[in-house]
Image (cartoon, grey):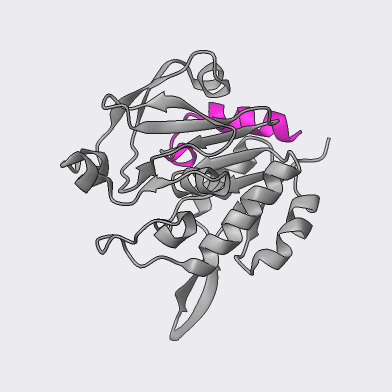
Amino acid sequence: MSRPLIGITAYYEAARWGDWVREAVLSPPSYAKAVVRAGGAPVVLPPVGPHAVEDYVRGLNGLVLAGGVELGAESYQGEQDARVPGPQPHRDRFELALARAAVRADVPVLAVARGMHVLNVAQGGTLIPWLPAALDSDRHAAPGAHTIQVSVTSRLGKAIGDRVEVVAPHHQSVRRLGTGLLAVAWAEDQIVEAVELQGHRFGVGVQWHPERGEDGRLFDAFMEAAR
């Protein structure tokens, strides 16, 4: 059986080769390695512009919306907070269009960290642009692990259980859920840590980075849907 073809979103960033510095398409290898371990064939998708998304989606069996810098507030008609690092509008536009196309085509989607925010905004949701100010605490930006509660009836809960310890430092969070999305995991303070797209073959967004750890159950479930 051939491996499912899995697209992974990526950056345009400056990169160095010896004395050369050039713009490059960059993706942390942990995403590709997680896809391979789960039985897929990874393909890195440069953010070339919304015109390419329908062609991408037609050729893919699944899509990973990868992590990265925070979404610009203009993507959800919000007000940009000065504390948020400069957004990357070209990547925002591309990934939002790609997410919408994948949802329309019922292509399995695993949305990681920033990717969860992309999926939420693509479905018409909004974000808290700077979570430390909203909570008067930077506890969600801390690098340490914390335990989250997962809905046992959700696809995510069936894959990883009802409680899981994650490392998920973030400065933004879901405020209003997008159309069709349901919150399925929460931190102790009820900040949303995972969402699922109802009625979709596989549409899961998580605030943490499952590609970095040894627990491959979420990628396994994603790959099963992509087959």
Position of residue 26 relative to residue 173, above or below, is below
Q: Magenta segment, which residues?
A: 208-227
Q: Quadrant of residue 198?
A: top right
Q: Quadrant of residue 72?
A: bottom left
Q: Which residue lies furthest to the right in this view?
A: 1
Position of residue 6 relative to residue 203, above or below, is below
Q: Main secondary structure of the magenta part?
A: helix
Residue 72 in view in this figure: no
Q: Residue furthest left?
A: 136
Q: Is residue 218 magenta?
A: yes
Q: Left of 84 or right of it: where is 117?
A: right
The image shows a total of numbered marks equal to 0
Position of residue 123 relative to residue 68, above or below, is above
Q: Which of 187 and 160 is in front in this view?
A: 187
Q: Which residue is drawn at 21% across and 39% down?
A: 135
Q: Where is residue 61 in the image (x, y as percent from the top left)?
A: 75, 43
Q: Residue at x 56, y 45 (%)?
A: 33
Residue 209 in view in this figure: yes
Q: Position of residue 152 (x, y in %)?
A: 49, 13
Q: Which residue is drawn at 59% across and 46% down?
A: 64
Q: Nearer the viewer, residue 80 or 141?
A: 80
Q: Which residue is drawn at 64% across and 68% down?
A: 49
Q: Where is residue 154 in the image (x, y as percent from the top left)?
A: 54, 19
Q: Position of residue 151 (x, y in %)?
A: 47, 17
Query: Which image quarter is the C terminus in?
Result: top right
Position of residue 42 relative to residue 79, above or below, is above
Q: Quadrant of residue 204?
A: top right
Query: Which image quarter is the N terminus in?
Result: top right
